[in-house]
Amino acid sequence: MQIDHYTYRVTWSAEDDEHVGLCAEFPSLLWLAKTPEDALKGIRGLVAEVVADMLTSGEALPIPLAEKHYSGEFRVRIPPEVHRALAIHAAEQGVSLNRLASAKLAAP
């Protein structure tokens, strides 16, 4: 398994006054560093160590998010009154409820 396929992110922590390196597939791991470059390097190194330990102990590795298959469908439960309001809004806009929901989810 190449650790390059995992999803990394670097963000700023005001609380720690440092950059934080994160890996989406290993949400319990993080790496603090003074620069974003060092935070990324640190989290990648930590993930490499954890992956090596998991392989040694025979544990299953998480599948990288980029390699998972996504159907484009998921179910969301909402209160009936919200469903009604969205259906009315979609009808007023002349679009399907699915298209309205998709556009709202994709909006920044």
Image (cartoon, rainbow, N blue to C red):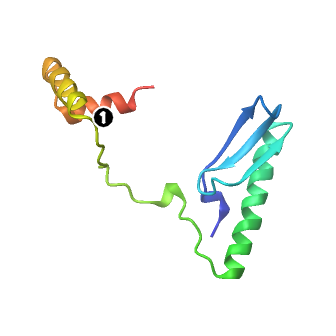
The picture quadrant where one finds residue 105 is top left
Q: Is residue 40 above or below residue 55?
A: above
Q: Residues within 10 Å of mark 1 (few under 14, many from 20)?
A: few
Extreme residue in the top direction: 92
Q: Is residue 58 above or below residue 64?
A: below
Say how many tags the image has.
Answer: 1
Give the residue type at disc 1.
Ser
In the visual, does 33 lie left or right of 100? Answer: right
Residue 100, image x and y in percent?
25, 29
Name the image quarter holding the N terminus.
bottom right
Q: Nearer the viewer, residue 66 or 96?
A: 96
In the visual, does 57 lie left or right of 81? Answer: right
Q: Residue at x 55, y 60 (%)?
A: 64
Label 1, secondary structure: give it. Answer: helix
Q: Nearer the viewer, residue 92 or 7?
A: 92
Residue 2, image x and y in percent?
65, 66
Name the image quarter holding the C terminus.
top left
Extreme residue in the right direction: 34
Q: Residue at x 73, y 72 (%)?
A: 52
Pointer 1 residue = 102
Q: Is residue 60 above or below residue 93?
A: below
In the visual, does 73 lie left or right of 52? Answer: left
Residue 24, image x and y in percent?
60, 51
Q: Residue at x 19, y 21 (%)?
A: 89
Q: Residue at x 71, y 54 (%)?
A: 29
